[in-house]
Image (spheres, grey):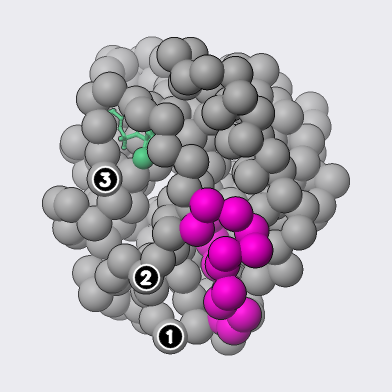
Amino acid sequence: MSIINYNKTFFLKSAANLSDINIEHGIEIAFIGYSNSGKSSAINSLTNQKKLARCSKTPGCTQLINFFHVTSNFRIVDLPGYGYAKCPISIKLKWENLIDSYLKKRKLLKGLVFLMDIRNPLKVYDQNIINIALDQNIPTFILLTKCDKLTLSQQKIQFQIVYKKLKFFSKEFNIELFSSFKKIGIKKLQSQLNTWYKEYR
Ligand SMILES: Nc1nc2c(ncn2[C@@H]2O[C@H](COP(=O)(O)OP(=O)(O)OP(=O)(O)O)[C@@H](O)[C@H]2O)c(=O)[nH]1
Ligand SMILES: [Mg+2]
């Protein structure tokens, strides 16, 4: 049985800058990945809610960090997706700075759920995030999202490719197949979040 009821998660606040956050207790786990990688959908599946985090077919240029209350001392955080091609360069730079400073400066950040579309993993900015996670010693759980788009054998091949490449960097990364649409990997995600929560309680 899960120690946390994720279904009770609710939206807390958004922040456009690190200095706007003003929450200084408990711990945070952040969902990070390219725009359109499936972060908001994953948060909705995790919490069994349809519209908790906003999802879109057309990725936008939102640059807000969204905080969700899971328990009084445990939050999940939906980070703005990076790499949306149609955004002006000034907005892209602001994204990168915001994410970069959140990862490097936020003391309450205790883990990352790092999402990559299984059809196109380990793109340039993903590698940048992996380097920051390693440098900052942030435990990272990797989800290969939208796995419903591939056959089982294609999923295995992609999994092995990512596994081998990441093992080269570090043994620390856990990788799972994930699909919000087919509800694959949600129990594993909950179990990882429970583990992190227990460590810091
Ligand atoms: N096939 C499939 N599509 C998915 C899955 N999860 C999300 N999608 C679709 O992918 C698109 C992007 O999903 P979001 O959850 O909004 O992605 P995001 O990472 O939050 O995107 P940004 O907010 O722009 O950073 C939407 O059209 C979703 O319906 C999945 O498990 N399978
Ligand atoms: Mg989103």
Looking at the rendered structure, the secondary structure element under dot 2 is strand
Q: Is residue 45 visible?
A: yes
Q: In which quarter of the image is the N terminus?
A: bottom left
Quadrant field for ligand 2? top left
Q: Name the residue under label 3.
A: 54
Q: How many marks can you see?
A: 3
Three-letter residue code for mark 1: Ser
The single residue placed furthest to the right in the displayed view is 135
Q: Front-most of 49 and 143?
A: 49
Looking at the rendered structure, the secondary structure element under dot 1 is loop
Q: Do the residues labelled 1 and 3 touch (CB within 8 Å)?
A: no
Q: Would you say the beta carbon of the disc 3 residue lies within 8 angstroms of ligand 2?
A: yes
Quadrant location of residue 3? Answer: bottom left
- At a point 50% along the width and 58% down the height, the residue shown is 15
Q: In this view, does 200 lie to the left or right of 175?
A: right
Question: Over which residues does the magenta segment extend?
Answer: 15-30
- At a point 15% along the width and 51% down the height, the residue shown is 50
Q: Name the residue under label 1.
A: 72
- At a point 28% along the width and 22% down the height, the residue shown is 58
Q: Is residue 134 left or right of residue 62?
A: right
